[in-house]
Image: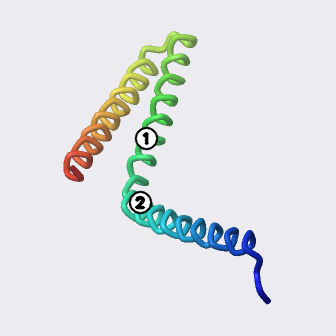
Amino acid sequence: MRLSGSEQRRWRELEAQLSRDRRLAALSRRLTARSTGGELPQRACHACVVTVCAGLGAAAAAVLLRSGALALVSLAILLGALIMLGTLLLTLALRDRRQD
């Protein structure tokens, strides 16, 4: 079956687009493979957020219940979250520096 001139032109355009899409897919796979190490910081970030929420909840409960012991517990939880966050930021900074 013969294609007309406009059909042949459209066919070449579609082949060129498919070629670009394949290159983009390959690039995307390479970038995904390179950034799979990003899962750990994301999990650590979620852990920090959950810890901060728990610490703030304990602090609110300490204020409402006027409990000094609960205030110390909330302080310890928030301090742990601060240490986790600092460790996460250092890890990300070192990883960025190593990749450059």
Q: Is residue 68 left or right of residue 94?
A: right
Residue 71 lies, with reference to residue 38, above or below; the image says above
Q: What residue sits 46% from the left and 27% below the top? A: 55
Q: Is residue 90 left or right of residue 31?
A: left
What residue would you read off at disc 2? 31
Q: What residue sits 48% from the left and 41% below the top? A: 46
Q: Position of residue 70 (x, y in %)?
A: 46, 21
The amino acid on which the numbered mark 1 sits, given as a three-letter code, is Cys
Q: What residue sits 38% from the left and 47% below the top? A: 41
Q: Position of residue 60 (x, y in %)?
A: 54, 16
What residue would you read off at disc 1? 45
Which quadrant holds the N terminus? bottom right
| Callout 1: SS | helix
Which is nearer the N-term, disc 1 or disc 2? 2
Label 2, residues with CA under 10 Å away: few <14, some 14-19, many ≥20: few
> What's the CA distance linking mark 1 and mark 2?
21 Å
Mark 1 or 2, which is nearer the eye? 2
| Callout 2: SS | helix
Nearest the eye: 97 or 56: 97
